[in-house]
Image (cartoon, rainbow, N blue to C red):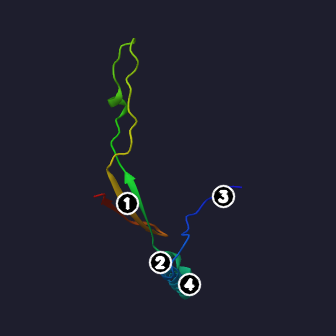
Amino acid sequence: MVLSARLVPCVLTDVQKADHAETSASFLTLFNENPDNFISRCVTVDETWLHHFDPESKAQSMAFKDVTYPPPRKCRVFASACKVIATVFWDSEGILLIDHLEHM
């Protein structure tokens, strides 16, 4: 059996609980009004940090060496300090918008 963990808020304030209940009730009302068209009217959003860097190509990293010397050592490439937050909006048809915001 394979189990998958889900991130669930452990402790919600009374205001957060009321917001969740209100949002759930409004979704239920929308579903009851038009169940066949409910999914097509939902939009989902997700945000993620993207780290970017320009790694060396294989050709760029090649070096000539004498057979009596060990090969050159290379440092491991880590993601640079350049990062962007990507916000993606999509619905049942596909992606609606991808927005990028540079880290300040």
The local secondary structure at tag 1 comes to strand
Q: Which of marks 1 and 3 precedes in the sequence?
A: 3
Q: Disc 3 and disc 1: Cα gap in Å?
A: 29 Å
The local secondary structure at tag 4 comes to helix
Label 3 sits on residue: 3
Residue 53 at x, y = what percent? 34, 45
> Label 4 neighbourhood size at 10 Å, few (<14), some (14-19), many (20+)?
few
The local secondary structure at tag 3 comes to loop
Depth order, front residue of 35/24: 24
Residue 1 drawn above or below residue 53: below
Indicate which label's residue lies in the foreground, 3 or 1. Answer: 3
Residue 77 drawn above or below residue 10: above
Contact, mark 2 vs mark 4 (Cβ under 8 Å): no
Q: Amino acid at mark 2?
A: Arg
Label 4 sits on residue: 28
> Label 1 neighbourhood size at 10 Å, few (<14), some (14-19), many (20+)?
some
> Label 2 neighbourhood size at 10 Å, few (<14), some (14-19), many (20+)?
few
Q: Which of marks 2 and 3 precedes in the sequence?
A: 3
Label 2 sits on residue: 41
Label 1 sits on residue: 86
Q: Amino acid at mark 4?
A: Leu
Q: Disc 2 and disc 1: Cα gap in Å?
A: 23 Å
Indicate which label's residue lies in the foreground, 2 or 4. Answer: 4
Q: Amino acid at mark 1?
A: Ala
- Most extreme residue toward the top is 68
> Label 3 neighbourhood size at 10 Å, few (<14), some (14-19), many (20+)?
few
Name the residue at 39% across, 42% down. Answer: 78
Q: Disc 2 and disc 4: Cα gap in Å?
A: 13 Å
